[in-house]
Structure formats: structure tokens, C-alpha cells
């Protein structure tokens, strides 16, 4: 039987849906949304979500 890869992430989200925005507690919140383009936390979340596999089939 093949080994399963388990990913441990510190972000609180279901695949495709953020439960709580990391921007709410960010110390750069005052410059939102301009800060979003160079935000490392949002980049990490987008990378994780892009690597996730969807359970639904598109027809």
C-alpha cells in the first residue's frame, strides 16, 4: 500500500474557503488592500490552495 502524504499547515481554512482572513490581525492592515500584492502570508495561502486537489468533477 502506498504511503499517504500528510500536510500540516498553520492556516485555518477549508479547501477553497478562508475561515478567517489573516489580514484581520495583520500589523499592515491600515494599508490594505495595497499591501496584498507583496504579502507573504497571502502568497503562502494561495500556494497551498493551488496545490490542493478539488473533490468535485467539472463537466
Image (tube, rainbow, N blue to C red):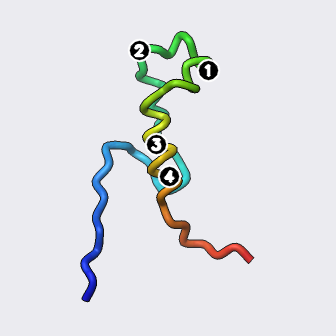
Q: Farthest right residue?
A: 59
Q: CA distance from mark 1 to mark 4?
A: 20 Å
Verify CB contact (< 8 Å) between mark 3 and mark 2. Answer: no
Q: Which residue is mark 2?
A: 27
Q: Secondary structure at mark 2?
A: loop
Q: Which residue is mark 3?
A: 45
Rendered image quadrant of residue 40: top left
Return the residue nearer the eye: 47 or 19. 47
Q: Give the foreground label among 3 and 2.
A: 3
Residue at image location 74% in from the left, 77% down from the top? 59
Residue at image location 54% in from the left, 49% down from the top? 17
Q: Which residue is mark 4?
A: 49
Q: CA distance from mark 4 to mark 2?
A: 24 Å
Q: CA distance from mark 1 to mark 2?
A: 13 Å
Compared with residue 57, is residue 32 higher up or lower down, i.e. above or below? above
For marks 3 and 2 on the same chain, the one whose residue lies earlier in the sequence: 2
Residue 33 image label: 1
Compared with residue 40, is residue 31 higher up or lower down, i.e. above or below? above
Residue 43 image label: none
Q: Residue 39, percent across and down? A: 48, 26
Q: Secondary structure at mark 3?
A: helix
Q: CA distance from mark 3 to mark 4?
A: 6 Å
For marks 1 and 2 on the same chain, the one whose residue lies earlier in the sequence: 2
Q: Check disc 2: other Cα within 10 Å, few if <14, some if 14-19, many if 20+.
A: few
Q: Residue 28, percent across and down? A: 46, 14
Q: Residue 44, percent across and down? A: 43, 40
Q: CA distance from mark 3 to mark 2?
A: 18 Å
Rendered image quadrant of residue 7: bottom left
The N terminus: image quadrant: bottom left
Verify CB contact (< 8 Å) between mark 3 and mark 4. Answer: yes
Amino acid at each position: 500500500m502506498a504511503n499517504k502524504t500528510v500536510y500540516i499547515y498553520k492556516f485555518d481554512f477549508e479547501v477553497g474557503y478562508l475561515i478567517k482572513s489573516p489580514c484581520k490581525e495583520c500589523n499592515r492592515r491600515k494599508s490594505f488592500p495595497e499591501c496584498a500584492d507583496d504579502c507573504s502570508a497571502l502568497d503562502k495561502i494561495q500556494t497551498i490552495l493551488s496545490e490542493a486537489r478539488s473533490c468535485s468533477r467539472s463537466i
